[in-house]
Image: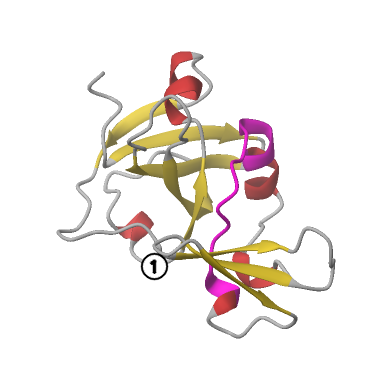
Amino acid sequence: MKNFELGSVYAIDTVKGIGIFQLVNIPEDKRHGVEMIRVSYDLYTEVPKSFQPVFDQDFFYIRFPVKAALKRKMINYIGHSDLIPGFKIPRYYRTPHYFNRDEWIIFDSETNQIEQVKTLTVEQLKLSTDSVWNIAFLKERLEEGWRLENWK
Protein backbone atom coordinates (compact mmCIF):
# COMPACT_ATOMS: atom_id res chain seq x y z
CA MET A 1 0.00 0.00 0.00
CA LYS A 2 2.01 2.97 -1.30
CA ASN A 3 -0.18 5.48 0.52
CA PHE A 4 0.67 3.83 3.83
CA GLU A 5 4.32 4.44 4.66
CA LEU A 6 6.32 6.61 7.01
CA GLY A 7 5.98 10.22 5.91
CA SER A 8 2.56 9.75 4.30
CA VAL A 9 0.35 12.79 4.84
CA TYR A 10 -3.40 12.57 5.26
CA ALA A 11 -6.38 14.90 5.49
CA ILE A 12 -9.46 14.61 7.65
CA ASP A 13 -12.53 16.72 6.95
CA THR A 14 -14.05 18.60 9.88
CA VAL A 15 -16.87 21.12 10.03
CA LYS A 16 -14.28 23.87 10.59
CA GLY A 17 -11.76 22.91 7.91
CA ILE A 18 -9.28 20.29 6.83
CA GLY A 19 -7.08 18.66 9.43
CA ILE A 20 -3.63 17.47 8.33
CA PHE A 21 -1.55 14.71 9.89
CA GLN A 22 1.49 12.61 9.05
CA LEU A 23 2.30 8.96 9.70
CA VAL A 24 5.47 8.84 11.83
CA ASN A 25 5.48 5.33 13.29
CA ILE A 26 4.25 1.93 12.18
CA PRO A 27 4.40 -0.57 15.05
CA GLU A 28 6.46 -3.72 14.65
CA ASP A 29 3.58 -5.71 16.10
CA LYS A 30 1.02 -4.86 13.44
CA ARG A 31 -1.60 -7.09 15.03
CA HIS A 32 -1.65 -5.37 18.43
CA GLY A 33 0.08 -2.04 17.86
CA VAL A 34 -1.42 1.21 16.60
CA GLU A 35 0.24 3.69 14.27
CA MET A 36 1.49 7.05 15.55
CA ILE A 37 0.75 10.32 13.78
CA ARG A 38 1.73 13.91 14.27
CA VAL A 39 -1.21 16.23 13.92
CA SER A 40 -1.16 19.89 12.97
CA TYR A 41 -3.19 22.09 15.32
CA ASP A 42 -4.22 24.24 12.36
CA LEU A 43 -7.23 23.62 10.15
CA TYR A 44 -7.02 24.56 6.48
CA THR A 45 -9.51 25.71 3.87
CA GLU A 46 -7.56 23.78 1.22
CA VAL A 47 -4.77 21.23 1.18
CA PRO A 48 -1.39 23.00 1.50
CA LYS A 49 0.96 22.76 -1.49
CA SER A 50 3.91 22.04 0.79
CA PHE A 51 3.67 19.94 3.95
CA GLN A 52 7.00 20.88 5.52
CA PRO A 53 5.75 24.18 7.02
CA VAL A 54 2.69 22.35 8.41
CA PHE A 55 4.86 20.19 10.65
CA ASP A 56 7.71 22.60 11.39
CA GLN A 57 6.60 23.50 14.93
CA ASP A 58 2.96 23.39 15.90
CA PHE A 59 1.77 19.79 16.24
CA PHE A 60 1.09 16.97 18.69
CA TYR A 61 1.40 13.19 18.58
CA ILE A 62 -1.28 10.54 19.10
CA ARG A 63 -1.87 6.91 18.32
CA PHE A 64 -4.43 6.56 15.52
CA PRO A 65 -5.49 3.57 13.37
CA VAL A 66 -4.37 5.06 10.05
CA LYS A 67 -4.52 1.90 7.98
CA ALA A 68 -8.04 1.06 9.14
CA ALA A 69 -9.30 4.64 8.61
CA LEU A 70 -7.73 4.73 5.15
CA LYS A 71 -9.28 1.41 4.19
CA ARG A 72 -12.71 2.69 5.29
CA LYS A 73 -12.18 5.99 3.41
CA MET A 74 -12.51 8.03 6.61
CA ILE A 75 -9.29 9.92 5.80
CA ASN A 76 -7.67 10.89 2.51
CA TYR A 77 -4.09 10.34 1.44
CA ILE A 78 -2.85 13.71 0.16
CA GLY A 79 0.88 13.23 -0.31
CA HIS A 80 4.21 12.44 1.22
CA SER A 81 6.82 14.43 3.13
CA ASP A 82 10.01 12.69 4.20
CA LEU A 83 10.71 12.61 7.90
CA ILE A 84 13.91 14.43 8.80
CA PRO A 85 17.03 12.22 8.96
CA GLY A 86 17.32 10.63 12.38
CA PHE A 87 13.68 11.34 13.25
CA LYS A 88 12.51 9.59 16.42
CA ILE A 89 9.10 9.44 17.97
CA PRO A 90 8.87 11.05 21.41
CA ARG A 91 10.33 9.22 24.36
CA TYR A 92 8.06 10.72 27.03
CA TYR A 93 4.27 10.95 27.14
CA ARG A 94 1.70 12.02 29.68
CA THR A 95 -1.70 10.82 30.72
CA PRO A 96 -4.10 11.70 33.52
CA HIS A 97 -3.62 9.49 36.57
CA TYR A 98 -6.07 6.61 36.63
CA PHE A 99 -7.09 6.98 40.27
CA ASN A 100 -5.91 10.41 41.45
CA ARG A 101 -7.72 12.91 39.26
CA ASP A 102 -5.42 15.75 40.32
CA GLU A 103 -2.25 13.95 39.22
CA TRP A 104 -0.53 12.98 35.99
CA ILE A 105 1.55 10.03 34.88
CA ILE A 106 4.68 10.71 32.83
CA PHE A 107 5.63 7.62 30.85
CA ASP A 108 9.14 6.88 29.52
CA SER A 109 8.64 4.67 26.46
CA GLU A 110 12.27 3.51 26.38
CA THR A 111 12.47 2.22 29.96
CA ASN A 112 8.73 1.71 30.62
CA GLN A 113 9.17 3.72 33.82
CA ILE A 114 6.42 5.99 35.08
CA GLU A 115 6.55 9.06 37.26
CA GLN A 116 3.54 10.46 39.08
CA VAL A 117 3.36 14.25 39.30
CA LYS A 118 0.84 16.61 40.86
CA THR A 119 1.81 19.68 38.85
CA LEU A 120 3.12 19.62 35.30
CA THR A 121 6.21 21.66 34.46
CA VAL A 122 6.26 23.87 31.37
CA GLU A 123 8.13 21.10 29.52
CA GLN A 124 5.72 18.39 30.68
CA LEU A 125 2.79 20.46 29.38
CA LYS A 126 4.24 19.94 25.88
CA LEU A 127 4.23 16.14 26.18
CA SER A 128 1.73 14.33 23.96
CA THR A 129 -0.55 11.57 25.09
CA ASP A 130 0.19 7.95 24.26
CA SER A 131 -3.53 7.29 23.96
CA VAL A 132 -5.28 5.88 20.93
CA TRP A 133 -7.81 8.30 19.48
CA ASN A 134 -10.63 7.35 17.14
CA ILE A 135 -11.75 9.48 14.21
CA ALA A 136 -14.63 11.14 16.08
CA PHE A 137 -12.40 12.17 18.99
CA LEU A 138 -9.70 13.51 16.65
CA LYS A 139 -12.26 15.59 14.72
CA GLU A 140 -13.79 16.90 17.94
CA ARG A 141 -10.41 17.96 19.33
CA LEU A 142 -9.41 19.69 16.09
CA GLU A 143 -12.73 21.53 15.83
CA GLU A 144 -12.57 22.81 19.40
CA GLY A 145 -8.99 24.08 18.98
CA TRP A 146 -7.59 21.67 21.58
CA ARG A 147 -3.92 22.15 22.49
CA LEU A 148 -1.51 20.22 24.73
CA GLU A 149 -0.67 23.36 26.70
CA ASN A 150 -4.33 23.75 27.69
CA TRP A 151 -4.81 20.10 28.64
CA LYS A 152 -4.39 20.43 32.41
**Which one is in front, 99 or 35?**
99
Say how the picture is coloured. Answer: secondary structure
Q: Position of residue 149 (x, y in %)?
A: 63, 72
The residue drawn where x is 40% and y is 35% is 10
Compared to 63, does 53 lie above or below? Answer: below
Residue 111 image-quadrant placement? bottom left
What residue is pinned by disc 1?
Answer: 57
Span of residues in magenta? 125-138
Rendered-image quadrant of the C terminus: bottom right
| Label 1 crowd bin: few (<14), some (14–19), many (20+), radius 10 Å | few
The residue drawn where x is 26% and y is 18% is 1
Q: Position of residue 71 (x, y in %)?
A: 44, 15
Query: In this rendering, would 51 be left or right of 128?
Result: left
Residue 17 image-quadrant placement? top right
**Which one is in front, 144 or 151?**
151
Q: Residue furthest left?
A: 85
Residue type (three-letter) at the residue carrying disc 1: Gln
Query: In this rendering, would 135 be left or right of 12?
Result: right
Secondary structure under the numbered disc 1 in the rendered image: loop
The magenta stretch spans residue 131: yes
Residue 76 image-quadrant placement? top left
Q: Residue furthest top?
A: 72
